[in-house]
Amino acid sequence: MFYPPPPFQYPPPPRGRGGFARGIFMTLATSIFGFSLLLNVYLLIAVGVTGKGTSSETVLVKGSREEQVAVIPINGVITEATFNRFDKLLRELGEDSTIKAIVLEIDTPGGELTATDEMYDRLLRFKQEKGIKVVVSMGGYATSGGYYLSCAADYIFAQPTSLTANIGVVFERMNFSGLMEKYGVQDTSITPAGSKFKNVESPFRPDTPETRAYLQTLVEAHYGRFKDIVKVGRAGKLKATVETVADGRALTADAAKQLGLIDDIGYADAAYSKAASLAGLSKMHVVRYQPPKGFLEALAGGDAKSWLKFDRSNSSGSVEINRSLLDELTVPRMMSIYRGQ
């Protein structure tokens, strides 16, 4: 009887050197990469005011060009790029003597705390330098950092379906100490003997009650500044204590108005009319200033980081992880953002 030969079995691919350490690193890198990929796609889609170059202009209401109401959209997650674009736009508008009022169309869940604070300060300085009024028109979201920025305005509108408030800050950080312990890896970083808090934010070391208490003081300090900004911005208008309204809740337009966090409920056209009224305009000319770059341009642009490099020059292949990928996820960030979208 004829028996066919057994099927040919290919030998397994050769194992690379340092299999154990490589396995640990790749597990950690894969976890970071997966989370970072989702985070950065979200940021790329959400970031609004990030374009470069001269802003485009769209006339919304025709009137006298000498009585211009400038509309500035603030969309998506607030980052340092958002502030840079906002600052540049205000410099352009500051040179135009026909601009008599500003309307901020805010549709953002908030974002990086420092960038938000820079925008708030920049808007206050612009108001003082130009002596003009600012009105806010809230879109779907003006939460956390979005409300922080709104406190620089003279009058705040929310649409009937807007969500706002969510007053508070969060110190975003990840901790991989449990993963490292599973694979027997220890963080042996060395700090000066007199600087025991130098590396407590490290994601590779487990927290202790002492380090948690220290980090809590940082969060409370920034939270206190946020509450002070609400007190100043809504002075004489709040119908409850700041502690009552600053408990982190996102509020509907009706609830926010009842608490005095906004002035009125209405759509963008109501905000344009209010800005014209505050500026004493009789023939308002409303113009929206829009950054030129859209999402597809940003996606194809050269600002994106190249995080992965594949080397196929040998049979086993290898993957190199850009250091910036690790830094992106392991560096703590103070945020003022609403995560309930």
Image: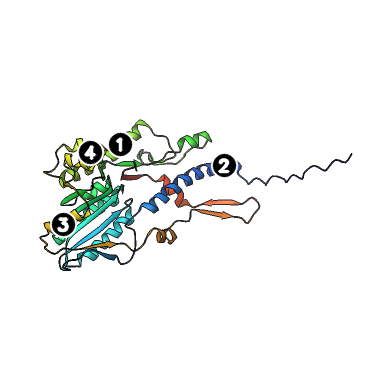
Q: Earlier in the sequence, mark 2 or mark 3?
A: 2
Give yes or no for contact between labels 2 and 4 (Cβ–Cβ under 8 Å): no
Query: Depth-wise, is mark 1 or mark 4 nearer the camera?
Result: 4
Mark 1 lies on residue: 216
Label 2 packing within 10 angstroms: few (<14), some (14-19), many (20+) = few
Q: Is residue 51 above or below residue 252?
A: below
The answer, for residue 122, to whether it is visible in the render is no
Mark 3 lies on residue: 273
Mark 2 lies on residue: 23
Relative to 263, 303 lies left or right: right
Give yes or no for contact between labels 3 and 1 (Cβ–Cβ under 8 Å): no
Q: Earlier in the sequence, mark 4 or mark 3?
A: 4
Q: Earlier in the sequence, mark 1 or mark 2?
A: 2
Secondary structure at numbered mark 1: helix
The amino acid pointed to by label 4 is Ala
Q: Earlier in the sequence, mark 3 or mark 1?
A: 1
The amino acid pointed to by label 3 is Ser
Give yes or no for contact between labels 2 and 3 (Cβ–Cβ under 8 Å): no
Query: Depth-wise, is mark 4 or mark 3 nearer the camera?
Result: 3
Mark 4 lies on residue: 246
Residue at the (62%, 46%) spot, across then down: 17
The amino acid pointed to by label 1 is Gln
The image quadrant of residue 19 is: top right
Give how far apart the Cα atoms at labels 2 and 4 are. Answer: 45 Å
Which numbered circle lies on residue 230? none
